[in-house]
Amino acid sequence: MLYDVKEFWKFNMRVGEVKEAERIPRTRKLIKLSVDFGDHTRTIIAGIGDQYTPEDLNGKKMIFVLNLKPKKLSGVVSEGMMVVAEEDDGKVHLITVSKDIPNGTKVW
């Protein structure tokens, strides 16, 4: 299916830096992230804990989608979504960006 580019522009994607990451108790895959976007910090839940540890994520600058409805996962509200690459077999790759890019920078 093809989409008009106007659909893409609806996403508010920003560079964020993971300041703190921790596993959510009693879950296998969920990691709670505290992400700095320059002018504010958000809690974002990532379902990649079966392939990455919190230590793998701390200090990384990545791309996040910010204008999604908040969603409660295992009792924690997620305020966005991390952008990753996923192979057909389910292997997930982190998409990191240069440390030189300021937190909060718009991605398009």
Image (cartoon, rainbow, N blue to C red):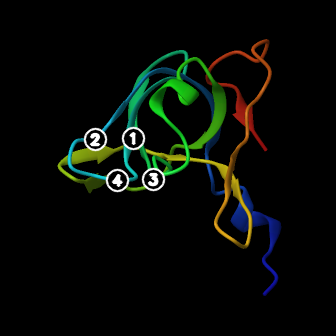
Report, in whole angstroms, how far the alpha carbon at label 4 lies from the one at label 2: 8 Å
In terms of secondary structure, where does tag 3 sit? loop
Report, in whole angstroms, how far the alpha carbon at label 3 lies from the one at label 4: 9 Å
Where is residue 103, by image quadrant?
A: top right
Q: Which of the labelled discs sits on residue 47, or is there none? A: 3
**Image quarter of the C terminus:** top right
Check contact, mark 1 vs mark 3: CB within 8 A: yes
Residue flagged by tag 1: what amino acid is it?
Answer: Ile
Locate residue 16, reporting x and y percent. Answer: 59, 27
**Image quarter of the N terminus:** bottom right
Report, in whole angstroms, how far the alpha carbon at label 1 lies from the one at label 3: 6 Å
Q: Nearer the viewer, residue 84 or 88?
A: 88
Check contact, mark 2 vs mark 1: CB within 8 A: yes
Residue flagged by tag 4: what amino acid is it?
Answer: Arg
Disc 3 vs disc 4: which is toward the camera?
A: 4
Residue for badge 4? 28
Q: Which of the labelled discs sits on residue 24, or is there none? A: 2
In terms of secondary structure, where does tag 4 sit? loop
